[in-house]
Each structure stands twice: as C-alpha cells, then as structure tokens.
Amino acid sequence: MYKDCKSKHAKERQLKIMLSFVELLEKNPLDTITVTSLCAYAQIPRKAFYRYFDTISDLIDFWTDQIIRDMRDVLSIIDFSNKAHLRSYLEDFFKYWNQHRSTIHIIRKNQLSNHVFMRMTNSAAKDFSAMNLNTSQISQEEIRFQMFVLIPALISILYLWDDEHYSYSVKDITDITYQTLSKPLL
C-alpha cells in the first residue's frame, strides 16, 4: 500500500517518483522496471522510494488512483434524468482522454487495463455508495448501470478509439457513444 502523504514536500516527492515511473513505462516494459532501476532513473535513494511505497505494485495503484483523481476533477456524476448532462459528461470524458492519449498507450502496452478498470470500478462504487447513503439522488439501478454497463462500455469505446488512432473527433466519438448509450437496453 502506498503512503498517504500529508506534507507538501512529501506529496511532491511521491509525485516525482510516480512521474519518473510513468516516463520509464513509456520507454520500457513494466516487467523490466525494478525499484533499483526506477531510483536510478529518478536520481533518488532506494530508501526514498520505500518511504512512500512498499512495492512497484503500490506505485501502480498510486498512479491509477492519481488518474482517477484527475478524471474526477474533470467529470461529474451523471444525472440520468437529464439527457444533455449525459452528452456533456461523455464529451468531457473523451476530451480528458484525448489529452491523455499517452496514458492509454502506457496502460495498454503494459497490460494494465484490467487493473485500471478494477480500480476505476471500485472507486466509482465507493462514490455511488456515498452518494446513495447521503442523498436519494441516485437509485440502486443507476448505480448498477454505471458500474456494470457504463464504465465497461466507455472503456471499450475508448480503446476502440485508440485502436483507430483517434481518427474520430471528440465530438464524433461523443455523438456515437451518446447514440449507443441512449438506446434502450433489451
């Protein structure tokens, strides 16, 4: 498990380690990156790594959670009663990922898709549960829809868009996705 840093200095150091890790992932397969090679690349002592992370897997969790936090800053919870809100959400989702294409490539190249997907789903489940406990804004059916239909569908469409080398504009992929998700399920 990674450490939850409180001080600004510690957070900056932890982020520096993560960014160095991502730079290494762009150039090298995940299975070749060790704590030693990461520390050499980041120009930090090994003990600095272990101050913030127990393992490389913890660093991957931290990076994934950072992606989720960044997305959360951009995206909101979907209001299913408002079709315009769904379109806006989808557009924001694709704008975010259009600006983070290299992250998608790193995730896919290093076979981290399932890991990222599971952390995103678990994070969404916590968000939806907290919403449902605090308000009646979202029903159990909507929670299940978002967790088991919407998130996997969006990730699948995102990967197809990546496979197509982003040949569709954000507007076009938003429209295609909106039309697909707006159709009634069986």
Image: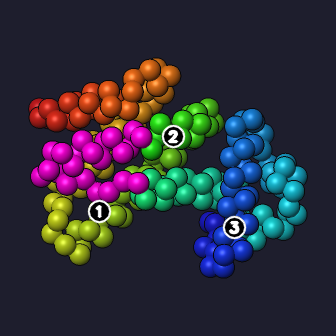
Q: Are marks 1 and 3 in contact (CB under 8 Å)?
A: no
Q: Nearer the viewer, mark 1 or mark 3?
A: 3
Identified at 30% across, 47% down, the residue is: 89
Q: Is residue 103 rendered magenta in the image?
A: no
- Closer to the camera in the image, 26 or 58: 26
Which quadrant holds residue 31? top right
Q: Is residue 163 visible from the viewing direction of this image?
A: no
Q: Are marks 1 and 2 in contact (CB under 8 Å)?
A: no
Q: Secondary structure at mark 3?
A: helix
Of pointers 1 and 2, the one earlier in the residue sequence? 2
Q: Classify residue 52 as left or right of residue 162.
A: right
Q: Which residue is mark 2?
A: 99
Magenta segment: 74-95
Q: Secondary structure at mark 1?
A: helix
Q: Which residue is mark 1?
A: 128
Residue 122 against residue 13 in the figure, above or below? above
| Count of marks placed on residues | 3
